[in-house]
Image (cartoon, rainbow, N blue to C red):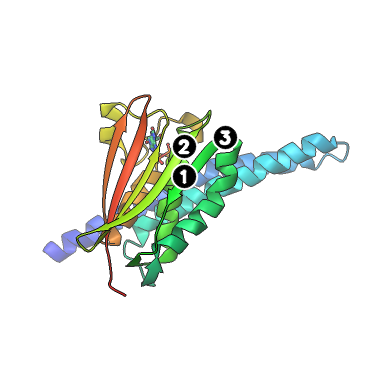
């Protein structure tokens, strides 16, 4: 009997997942379709065409992020476990977020050493990007994103902090809840859900502390492997 219940729950989860994905991805697809139709007009000004193209690319990226964040639920455990050097991984993340940080005059301050953990690079990247993007989005008008590593008791301590808006107690309590966002149309409320899920799938732990108008600190711990 218990097996049957588990199966039914899984089915429910899958169908919920499928309807959520189609619902959320339909919006960006509709936007892209609309702009493609506008671009059919041969007399369209060059500047408008560029704007429409940029909006379409942004919307496709949005759809891609939504699907990716949902998939961490469909595929809860990492499949391609390898030994990862956290320094290399953080360098990859920083390469991707630097242009975003530059747009808001954000300084990225790093003190990162090579430590080795077990994981799947793609998943870890998704997790680090989701967290760092949130930090950057919390500092719309300059600030500092600090990324530090340390080791203690056979564990990697990774600290990512921003000098941004911070969160209220209520917001902090809800972070990671599916669809919890304070960003309206711009947010999905799926980024932290996926990040937290990935951290626990890699045997890690996360602790978040935040002060309104001061900033937020994400403290992440992973078991170290001796190499
Ligand atoms: P989204 O970024 O799409 O809103 P997330 O799951 O990534 O969804 O984040 C959920 C919410 O948590 C955000 O809307 C924001 O209110 C809050 N949050 C996350 N990270 C930070 C941060 N570094 N500083 C302030 N608020 C944050
Ligand atoms: Mg986010």
The secondary element bearing badge 2 is classed as strand
Q: Residue at x 41, y 28 (%)?
A: 165
**Which quadrant of the figure contains the C terminus?**
bottom left
Pick the front one: 137 or 219: 219
Give above or below for 30 relative to 81. above
Residue 29 seen: no
| Disc 1: which residue | 109
The span from disc 2 to disc 3 (Cα, nearest Å) is: 9 Å
| Most distant residue in the top direction | 213
| Disc 3: which residue | 105
Judge from the rendering whether residue 185 lies leftward or rightward of residue 191; answer left or right.
Answer: right
Residue labelled 2 has its Cβ within 8 Å of some atom of ligand 1:
no
Q: Position of residue 77 (x, y in %)?
A: 31, 65
Tags 1 and 2 touching, CB below 8 Å: yes
| Most distant residue in the left direction | 1
| Residue 144 badge | 2
The secondary element bearing badge 3 is classed as loop
N-terminal label among 2 and 3: 3
Q: Residues within 10 Å of mark 2 (few under 14, many from 20)?
A: some
């Amino acid at each position: 009997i218990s097996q049957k219940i588990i199966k039914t729950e899984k089915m429910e989860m899958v169908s919920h997942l499928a309807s959520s994905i189609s619902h959320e991805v339909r919006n960006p697809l509709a936007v892209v379709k609309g702009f493609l139709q506008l671009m059919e007009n041969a007399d369209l000004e060059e500047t408008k065409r560029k704007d429409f193209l940029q909006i379409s690319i942004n919307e496709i990226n949005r759809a891609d992020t939504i699907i990716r964040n949902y998939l961490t639920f469909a595929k809860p455990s990492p499949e391609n476990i390898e030994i990862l050097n956290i320094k290399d991984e953080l360098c990859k993340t920083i390469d991707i977020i630097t242009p975003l940080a530059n747009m808001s005059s954000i300084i990225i301050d790093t003190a990162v050493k090579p430590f080795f953990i077990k994981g799947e690079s793609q998943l870890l990247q998704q997790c680090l990007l989701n967290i760092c993007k949130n930090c950057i989005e919390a500092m719309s008008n300059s600030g500092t994103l600090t990324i530090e590593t340390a080791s203690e008791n056979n564990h990697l301590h990774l600290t990512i902090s921003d000098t941004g808006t911070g969160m209220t107690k209520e917001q902090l309590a809800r972070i990671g809840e599916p669809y919890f966002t304070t960003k309206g149309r711009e947010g999905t409320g799926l980024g932290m859900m996926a990040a937290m899920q990935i951290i626990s799938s890699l045997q890690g732990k996360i602790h978040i502390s935040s002060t309104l108008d001061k900033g937020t600190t994400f403290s992440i711990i992973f078991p170290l492997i001796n190499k």
